[in-house]
Structure formats: structure tokens, C-alpha cells
Amino acid sequence: MAHRYRYELLLAIVTGILLLAGLGKIEVNIMEARNFTTAREMVQNREYLLTTLNGEPRYQKPPLPTWLTALSGMAFGFDSLFTLRLPVVAITFLLVFAFYFLSIALGLSKKQSFNNALILITSFYIFFGGRDNQWDMYTHAFMVTSIFFLWRLLQKDTHRLGNSIAAGVFFGLSILSKGPISLYALFLPFLISYGMVYRFHLKGKGIYFINMLFIGLLVGLWWYAYVRLKDPEYFRAIVGHEAANWASYETKPFYYYWNFFIQSGLWTLPSLTALAYPYLKKRVDNLKAYRFSLLWTLFSVILLSAVPEKKPRYLLPTLIPMAINTGFYIDYLFRRFSKGLPRAEKLWVYFSFGLLGFIALAYPFALTFILKTDILNYLPIAIISSILMLTCAFFILRGMKSFNFQITFYSTIALFTVVVVAIIPLSQNLFTNPAYKPASSALNVEAKYGVKTYRLNDIAPEIVWDFGKVIPSLPKINENIQAPPEKQFGLLVARSDSTIVRSGFPNFEVKKVHTIDMNYRPRHRDRLIRDYYVLRLKE
């Protein structure tokens, strides 16, 4: 039994190690802070549909990921980052295994599909997205699962209704996770590529495809309809703002994503090689599946490039079909490397993977250079990580020398795992900001002076999350800031607004008593710094 499911078991073990190692030690970023804060307010206010962030309506993102986060918070509390991130870990497991079974459904062997899944989970944005509890991973994981069932519907003549319903439900869950993002970046390129390579043969299946879309839209759109009815004015404002962002916010030229393959990180050079269709088309075992994965990847990039708003992390869905595409090149090396390759091909393999081996060899020396005498404070982890890195380097290079690419490939996966388990946690302790003061430290100030804390203007979601409760804005009349009813209150102020505090409250004694600095790293972002003032009404 274990032998039969060895690939699935190994995939689960590797994925679990990569996603769970040091999961609670990662700093909370702006997107996670929004999700965590909204989940906390859901539970505190017992309001799960009209979502809020810092007490104000927050409808920019649909609520499914936040519901799952809220469930984790209800079960384990909101103080553990590890448990709050478990929902996204579970969803990433869903992505990895749906992807694995989709790869098998394409007609690829279990071993090649296993390798494809390893490429996927070790791709840069997939790995980090699987440990970052915000919306992206949910929408794409559900869409890949929907595509798997849609593939079964299109390719098989059995279980049509079941595949149609399952595809529709997961399609809807994707929309309920981040709107139409994955529909545009993953599902639409899939349909275009499938039509070009496999053709649509919908005789007797068209009604099931329509059924899938109907169920998907029903599952995905009901929350939007509910909010539109309950809070129409705010909903319309947010929809208009989000639509405008697509055309005016973070706008980049069409060619901005030309180097999309580097977002796979470890697999940059193999991914680039696999995109070379004239080179690889005569070297793959399943040409039709290779064409399909290549077109799926390229159409995903093209459609994303057509949107004016661009960010590197928006390429996450492209990495999914690209992992299948890269897997064709890896499979070719598995089959042919031991039998000999042309000199140019062999040199390229040596460069692509030998580079990783030599980087691993250099690790102990680089660590000593960076830490200098401080290495004594981290000696056990430095020694262990160095031994592991040197071992991986040895096997990567040995695999190439003995013409056994299997050793090189799996040693590369091991290298990535060592980086995650040993080196990333070490770096968390090294590059920290000595002036770091969490927002939660201001709670002691609040208690000392017996005040309620307000904010002067907008405030970073990371600060709101760490503070642990809503930080209301000062009341305004005709856009003029007013003092709250309390005779003494706390006020969080950006440093650029310090003059407003001194001049804007003439009837109050103003005293700066504390500073919040949520910059976990030495680089400083002003939005994560707030001065805490106590204002007391003059006698």
C-alpha cells in the first residue's frame, strides 16, 4: 500500500516541511494584517457578511479566506500566527495535490507529475504564498481544483454530472476568494489553450459545462449581491475605486512581465529552457501536453500584461502551468542525461544546476563573512546548516559528474528544503531593527494614562493588527478634526503630522510619550512608525 502511494506520501511530507517550518516566525505583512484584522473583527462583532477593517466597511476582497481564518482564530485564538496561517497551508496542500492529479490527467506519469508538483511548491511565489495567509493562494488553489474536474468533464464520458458540479463549486469558491482574478489569469488562458490544442468536443457535454458555470456564478456571486443590497452606497464606491485601480494604480508598460520566468526562483534557467519550443518539441514524450502547458503559460502572461496595473506577485497564477511546462524539460533530463547529451546541452545543464551547487558550497564562507564574530552566537545552527548545505552541494555536483540527473534534481529539492528549515529562521534573527517597538507596546501606555487611543489619519493595517483592537479616527465636522468627548485621550500620529497635533488642539496639553516602530527589518517605512501623544484638556 505504501509503495503504491509513495509519490503522494513523499509529496505530502515535502510540502508539509516546506510550509510548516518556521510558520509562526514570519512577520505579518500588510495583506495578512488586513485578513487577520478582519477575521478578528468578524468574531468580535459576530458579523460575518458585512466585513470590516478597523471598524470600517471593507468589501474590497470577498470573505471566504477570512472566514477560514476566523474559524482558525475561534478554534485556537488570535495570538498564534502559526495557527492563523494553517488555513492557507491547507489550501496550498489542495493546490499541490489538485495540480499533481491534473498533471496525471494530462497523460503524464506519476513520477513526472510528482516532479512537477515539487517544482510547483518550490517555485518562489508559490512557496511564499503558501505561508502568507491572504487571498491569492485561495483563489488559485480553488481554480486549479475546478480546472481538474473540468478536464475530467471534457475528456471523459463518465460522471459528467458529478464533475460538472464539483468544477462549478470550486469555480465559485475561487470567485468568493478574490473575485474574477483567477478566472481571468488562470481559467481563461486554460480554455484558450485547451481549445487550440485539444479542441472542444461538447456533444452531449454542453449542458454540463453550462451547469458548471451556473453553479460557479451562483456560489461565487451571492455575497456580492448581499452586500450590494445591504450597503449599496459603500459597495458602489468600493467597486468604482477598485475598477479605477486596474487602470491607474501601479501602472506598468505591457512588457513589464517579460522576465516572468525568474519568479520561479530556483527554476529560473530550467523554466527558460522549457519555454524554448523549437528546442524541446522533439525531446518530449507527450508533445500535445507540452504544447498545451506552454500555451497556457504564455496566454496567462499575455492576459496579465494587458492589464495596466501590474505587480510581480500577480504572476503567481502563471507559475502553475509553468511548473508543468518546466517539468517536461526535467523529464527529458531524467531520460537522456545518463545516455549522453550534445556538448552544448550538457554545458547548459552544468551551468543551470552547477551554479546552485557552487552557491551551496559558498554558504559557510558567506555566513562567516556576514556574521564575523557574531557567528559564535549562532554556532549550532550555523554548523548544522553548513553541513547540510555542503551535503546538498556534494550530491548536486556528484549527480552531474556521474550522469545521474535524478540525484541532482532531488538534491536541488533538498537544498531548497534546507534553506527553508535552517537558513530562513536564522536570517529572521540576523537582520532585525534594534528600534523595533510593536504596536501592542502602546497598550501599556494606554493603561498607564487611562486613555482611549485614537488615530489622526490613516494607519497601517499592521499597526491595527498588532494593537489588538479598533483604533478609531478622530471625529470630523466639515473635514475639520475635532477633539473626542474625553478630557484626556491618546493619539497615534505620523511624524509628518506632528505640527498638526501641536497647533490643532490649543485647548489641550500635548505630550509625546511613546513611539511605535513596526519596521521589523532595518529598512524604514514611515507608514509603520507612529508617535503616541497623550492630550489632556487644560484646566
Image (tube, helix red, strand yellow):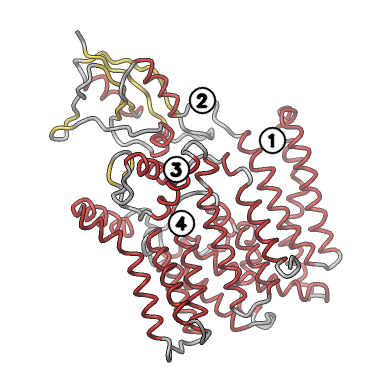
Is residue 220 or residue 44 the one in the foreground? 44
Q: Are marks 1 and 4 in contact (CB under 8 Å)?
A: no
Q: Nearer the viewer, mark 1 or mark 3?
A: 3
Determine crowd level at label 2: few under 14, some 14-19, many 20+ residues with C-alpha closer than 10 A.
some
Q: Which residue is mark 4?
A: 136
Asked which secondary structure carries label 2, the reply is loop
Q: Which mark is residue 435?
A: 2
Inter-mark Cα distance, 1 to 2: 21 Å
Q: Which mark is residue 324?
A: none
Q: Tag 1, which secondary structure?
A: helix
The span from disc 2 to disc 3 (Cα, nearest Å) is: 33 Å
Residue denoted by label 3: 74
Whether pointer 1 and pointer 2 mark residues with C-beta atoms closer than 8 Å, the reply is no
Position of the N terminus by quadrant = bottom right
Q: Total of numbered circles in the picture?
A: 4
Q: Count neighbours of disc 4 (C-alpha within 10 A) and say few if under 14, some if 14 to 19, many if 20 or more.
A: many
Q: Which residue is mark 1?
A: 370
Q: Nearer the viewer, residue 151 or 509?
A: 151
